[in-house]
Image: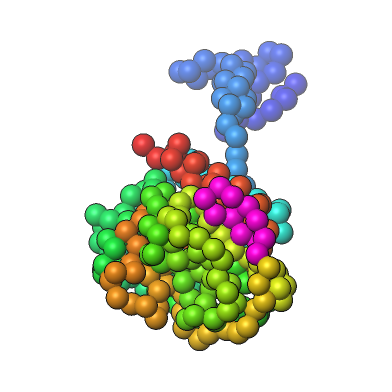
């Protein structure tokens, strides 16, 4: 009785065709054993589009661990219900080149002002110089609803007090971080005056309150929204206070702009992504 076929060879109770590697049944056993050692990943479609775009920009493939981290992040954000709120999102780490790092995960690609390859580290992101280097996100501050907006950055080296990490608009219409001071489309920014590091985010989901995470602290501001602005969000500086004295010399591995979002869930996803990159990259 012929029970299974491997190419042109048969095996059964009496048919023991041999190859240089051994009998056909032995080969079947080895194949089944070895395949059992593999875990096959089915990539999310959006994750795969991003991975392909980064690898094209890099002209190199990414490590399996980096690709798995991207996929886990995208799948996780969708499962958490926060993916759709991310409108302009860029992972400034993981890619093999600066060009690859400026490929957006979602939205329009940022415009690079004066960053060079030496400023980029695959594990920790992009380093400012405190004077001339910044990114323009190319996303206008007024594209998101008045009472539904988030700005998030992940800093691996602190932005000093009195420096901008992410900022869109001007004065009462501004949104973003100036050191650890939060602007949220309000006439009254938050208190502060310290540097900013790690995951930092603000999310306005109503006319009078703003959730935030900064320097490990979580809280809510009570401050009314007053308006929006047509300027685009800048990273490492303000689009309106352009003097070099306000530029950040911190290092940034991630930013996101969009509608109101669950910051606690986002914090977990982004932090895990950066940690997984660090583990996957030699």
Q: Position of residue 148 (x, y in %)?
A: 67, 73
Classify residue 273 as left or right of residue 239. Answer: right
Classify residue 56 as left or right of residue 132. Answer: right
Q: Position of residue 155 (x, y in %)?
A: 44, 53
Asked if residue 159 is positioned above or below residue 27 in the image, the reply reads below
Magenta-span inclusion, residue 70: no
Front residue (pair 26, 197): 197
Q: Position of residue 99 (x, y in %)?
A: 34, 62
Task: Please tell me which residue is depicted at 33% across the width and 77% down the height of the picture.
Answer: 242
Task: Please tell me which residue is depicted at 71% across the width and 59% down the height of the picture.
Answer: 81
**Quadrant location, the N terminus:** top right
**Quadrant location, the C terminus:** top left
Asked if residue 271 is positioned above or below residue 181 in the image, the reply reads above
Check the image and name the residue furthest to the right: 1
Q: Which residues are magenta?
A: 211-221
Task: Please tell me which residue is depicted at 40% across the width and 40% down the height of the picture.
Answer: 281
Task: Please tell me which residue is depicted at 56% across the width and 60% down the height of the picture.
Answer: 201
Magenta-span inclusion, residue 217: yes
């Amino acid at each position: 009785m012929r029970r299974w076929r491997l190419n042109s060879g048969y095996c059964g109770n009496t048919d023991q065709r041999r190859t240089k590697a051994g009998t056909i049944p032995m080969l079947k056993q080895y194949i089944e054993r070895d395949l059992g050692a593999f875990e096959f990943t089915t990539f999310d479609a959006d994750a795969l589009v991003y991975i392909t775009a980064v690898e094209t920009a890099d002209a190199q493939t990414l490590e399996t661990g980096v690709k798995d981290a991207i996929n886990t992040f995208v799948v996780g954000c969708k499962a958490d219900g926060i993916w759709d709120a991310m409108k302009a999102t860029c992972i400034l780490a993981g890619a093999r080149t600066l060009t690859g790092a400026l490929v957006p995960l979602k939205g329009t690609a940022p415009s690079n002002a004066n960053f060079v390859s030496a400023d980029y580290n695959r594990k920790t992101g992009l380093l400012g110089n405190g004077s001339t280097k910044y990114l323009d996100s190319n996303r206008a501050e007024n594209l998101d609803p008045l009472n539904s907006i988030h700005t998030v950055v992940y800093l691996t080296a602190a932005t000093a007090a009195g420096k901008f990490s992410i900022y869109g608009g001007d004065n009462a219409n501004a949104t973003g971080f100036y050191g650890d001071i939060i602007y949220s489309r309000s006439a009254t920014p938050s208190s502060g005056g310290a540097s900013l590091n790690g995951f930092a985010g603000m999310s306005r989901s109503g006319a009078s309150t703003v959730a935030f995470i900064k320097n490990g602290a979580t809280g809510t501001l009570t401050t009314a929204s007053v308006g929006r602005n047509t300027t685009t969000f800048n990273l490492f500086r303000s689009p309106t206070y352009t003097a070099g004295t306000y530029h950040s010399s911190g290092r940034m591995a991630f930013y996101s702009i969009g509608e109101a979002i669950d910051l606690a869930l986002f914090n977990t996803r982004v932090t895990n992504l950066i940690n997984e990159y660090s583990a996957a990259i030699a």
